[in-house]
Image (cartoon, rainbow, N blue to C red):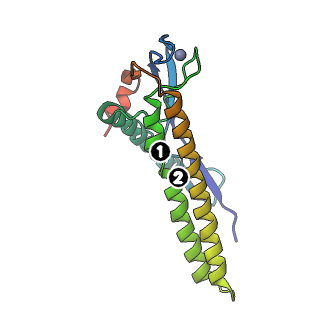
Amino acid sequence: MGSYYKHKKKETIDVSYSFRCEQCMKESGTLKATISGMEAEINSNYKTLDDKKQNKLNEMAHNNLVSAVKEAYSNATGKHIFVKAFKDECPHCHKPQTWGISGIQNDMFGTPIVCVILGIILGAGCYFFSGVENNLMIAVAAAGICVVIGAGILVLNLIKLGSKKKQTAGVVQKNEPVIEWNDVQHILNER
Ligand SMILES: [Zn+2]
């Protein structure tokens, strides 16, 4: 069997933002959020990709970044959801902001759902392709582990959410971050 190489590429971009702290009322000053696209991947038998494949990998990585930026933009401007790249910790008093809750809520089920789907695939894989005597047990165990991990992550997210809600419960004046979308206008203009 020939060896093969995974070629990966991820694109990121910085967006400036600032906010007025809801807890100590100080201005945060300019902060940087790094939005990253999903990592693109191409498998190849060679250590270096030819130009055509390299271009394809670059294009995939870039398209992933474009979707991530567009999603962050439409979430923020349309739904008042601020993705986790926009850190809500005040640089002065280090307390969280009410608008930081939306990012956790938005992201809460993503990883757990992926775990459950992975569990189903893994379980089915073990059941149908392992060819051993007790494959049903192995399949159930494999699926079970994934589901348990998924549930664990969900519980962790719920704890994080609860803690942030508690820490921002006393806030009277709710603010939202000001995001310099101009920084990524060229990306937002792409289709
Ligand atoms: Zn503060």
Q: CA distance from mark 2 to mark 1?
A: 8 Å
Question: 114 left or right of 184?
Answer: right
Q: Amino acid at mark 1?
A: Asp
Q: Amino acid at mark 2?
A: Thr
Question: 169 left or right of 50?
Answer: left
Q: Is mark 1 within 8 Å of ligand 1?
A: no
What is the x, y in percent for residue 82?
A: 42, 33
Of 22 and 166, the residue lying toward us: 166
Q: Quadrant of the N terminus?
A: bottom right
Q: From the image, tell me which residue sits under label 1.
A: 107
Element at badge 2?
helix
Outermost residue, front direction?
Answer: 170
Q: From the image, tell me which residue sits under label 2.
A: 111
Q: Is residue 49 visible?
A: no
Image point (64%, 65%), residue name: 145
What is the x, y in percent for residue 22?
A: 46, 18
Q: Quadrant of residue 79?
A: top left
Q: In the rendered view, would you say 5 is above or below 68? A: below
